[in-house]
Image (cartoon, grey):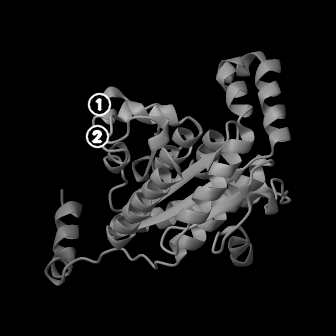
Amino acid sequence: MRKKKQMYRITTTIKLSDFKTKEVVNDAKKKLKKIRKKISKLQDTMYAEGKHSMLICLQGMDTSGKDSLIREVFKDVNARGVEVHSFKVPTELELKHDFLWRHYIVLPAKGKIGVFNRTHYENVLVTRVHPSYVFAENIPNVNSLVDLDDAFYHDRMQKINNFEKHLTDSGTIVLKFFLNLSKEEQKNRLLRRLNIPEKNWKFSSGDLKERKLWEKYQFCYEDLLNRTSKENASWFVLPADDKPTARLLLASIVLKELEKYNFKEPTLSAKLQIQVADFKEQLNNE
């Protein structure tokens, strides 16, 4: 998958329209099972070593498959080894802090994998499509829509770059994935939610309102992908129309990244190693 990994990774200025939204890998589900077992084993070793953590950031349009992807990719990881956080509309407390605060306080501890389902990038995406949302942050010198120009959002993107640089310098492996869904497939998935009674609860009329802003979202995504994909914290654009393939591609990239670090379990100190035989004897004689 190394060659494919480079196909999806953003290393130069890109146009989203140049990326496929659909790719189908044969036996994707079967291949995923093998890969997620390897991810689980590597996470166990990473936990024992205690030097690194991993932050996986997921972004995508509504219905792009983030929830099911998290469930399927990480189902074999030890429950204490993976933490998932979904970010909704900021709470009153969160709005009393800077825009990165609520993300910083739930970062994964060393040894763990953290998954952000929607991320700190909502602050340069949704707020850029709906700039009036920023007023709730009560920021000095932001008094009208005129103040929320491109320079405002580009400054925020640079703050995010600095934030992620701090994380990687501290031992966090940062991987960012944009699930690239076609407008036609989103339509099909929304209709499915309406046509299948047990899926109705997933549908919101707000989904249709946001759908009308599709082109604006695509512009904002393209801009943030180009400005915030860095060597230390790269973005990957994954075709999302076929869910099993999207899950397999993401898992493959995660596995390759974890394998780079050659994690090692710590060994017993020389003092304890000398006493191992005695410890065994004590237990066997109970």
For the residue pair 134 and 147, the one nearer the viewer reads as 147
Pinpoint residue 196: horizontal percent, then vertical percent.
80, 20
Q: Residues within 10 Å of mark 1 (few under 14, many from 20)?
A: few
Q: Residue at x 57, y 47 (%)?
A: 75
Q: Residue at x 16, y 73 (%)?
A: 278
Q: Residues within 10 Å of mark 2 (few under 14, many from 20)?
A: few
Q: Residue at x 68, y 60 (%)?
A: 237
Q: Is residue 141 left or right of residue 212?
A: left
Amino acid beneath label 2: His
> CB atoms at circles 2 and 1 under 8 Å apart?
yes
Which of the labelled discs sits on residue 93, or is there none? 1
Callout 1: SS: helix
Asked whether residue 37 appears in the rendered view, the answer is yes
Res 215 → quadrant: top right
Residue denoted by label 2: 97
Pinpoint residue 43: horizontal percent, then vertical percent.
46, 63
Q: Quadrant of the N terminus?
A: bottom right
Callout 2: SS: loop
For the residue pair 58 and 67, the one nearer the viewer reads as 58
**In the image as oriented, which residue stretches furthest toward the left?**
271
Pinpoint residue 62: horizontal percent, then vertical percent.
67, 36
Give me the C-alpha separation between circle 2 and circle 1.
Answer: 7 Å
Amino acid beneath label 1: Leu
For the residue pair 174 and 42, the one nearer the viewer reads as 174
Asked whether residue 29 appears in the rendered view, the answer is no
